[in-house]
Image (cartoon, rainbow, N blue to C red):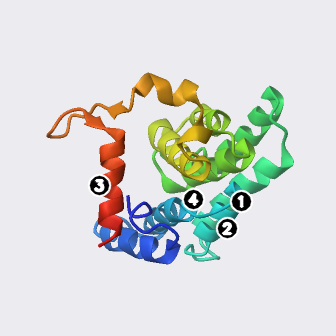
Amino acid sequence: VFGWIRPGEPLAAAELAWRDARLSHTRNGLYGAMWAAALGSAAMVAGSVDEALDLASTVVPPRSALADAIALGRVQAAATDLSEDGVRAALDAIHAAYGHLHWVHVLNNAAVIAYALAAGRGDFGRSVSLAVTAGWDTDSAGATVGAVAGALLGVNGIGEQWTAPLKGRIDTSMPGGPQQIVDLAARTVALAGR
């Protein structure tokens, strides 16, 4: 959400994430929250996946393990084709580097997010599918990739096969129950104006 309320301001989005994440995270966990916020912010204004990834990476310490994980994901995306064998080889390389970590660790999941976005090359369904295929924190990685790809593409670029089943609503266990997506977007835009 920090990226959505600071569109085009990756550093400001990262600062908000830092304020929140420092209560429970350290080092790479903190950098990961900052990167995710910057990625959402950048996606709102970037012209491509690579531009969004480049902008978001400016908030990550360059010698950190997180910077290495993001780089690995991008390198694997650039070095492999999207055949079944190519995807398997890329994900195997990421698993070889980070398979020893917990399934919700930031390093393995950041590598997957960077890989899925870069390898998906702007295709919403392919990008989300790659994130989920990797395993680990599939709901968070898939949601992050879907949000970034969706922001880059706009609602019409996502594809009706993904949007039509939602019928413009989202069900939630939060107070208030089901919500209209356009209403939630309007609330986010209003928050961004503050």
Gap in angstroms between the C-alphas marked 4 and 3: 19 Å
Which dot marks residue 187?
3
Residue hosting label 2: 54
Instruction: Classify 10 Å Cα crowding around label 1: few (below 14), some (14-19), many (20 and above).
Output: some
Q: Which comes sooner in the sequence, label 4 or label 1?
A: 4
- The amino acid type, in three-letter code, at marker 3 is Arg
Q: Position of residue 51 (x, y in %)?
A: 69, 64
Position of the C terminus, as image quadrant, is: bottom left
Q: Position of residue 119 (x, y in %)?
A: 74, 45
The secondary element bearing badge 3 is classed as helix
- Residue at image position (48%, 25%) is 164
Q: Position of residue 161 (x, y in %)?
A: 56, 24
Q: Which comes sooner in the sequence, label 2 or label 3?
A: 2
The secondary element bearing badge 2 is classed as helix
Residue hosting label 4: 43
- The amino acid type, in three-letter code, at marker 2 is Asp
- Relative to 38, 111 lies left or right: right
**Residue 5: in sight, yes or no?**
yes
When the figure is inspected, residue 84 is found, relative to residue 116, above or below; the finding is: above
Asked if labels 1 and 4 touch by Cβ distance under 8 angstroms, the answer is no
Instruction: Classify 10 Å Cα crowding around label 2: few (below 14), some (14-19), many (20 and above).
Output: some
Asked if labels 1 and 2 touch by Cβ distance under 8 angstroms, the answer is yes
Gap in angstroms between the C-alphas marked 4 and 1: 10 Å
Gap in angstroms between the C-alphas marked 2 and 3: 28 Å
Asked if labels 2 and 4 touch by Cβ distance under 8 angstroms, the answer is no
- Residue at image position (33%, 57%) is 188
Residue hosting label 1: 50
- The amino acid type, in three-letter code, at marker 4 is Ala
Of tags 3 and 1, the one toward the viewer is 3
- Relative to 73, 105 lies left or right: left
Asked if labels 3 and 2 touch by Cβ distance under 8 angstroms, the answer is no
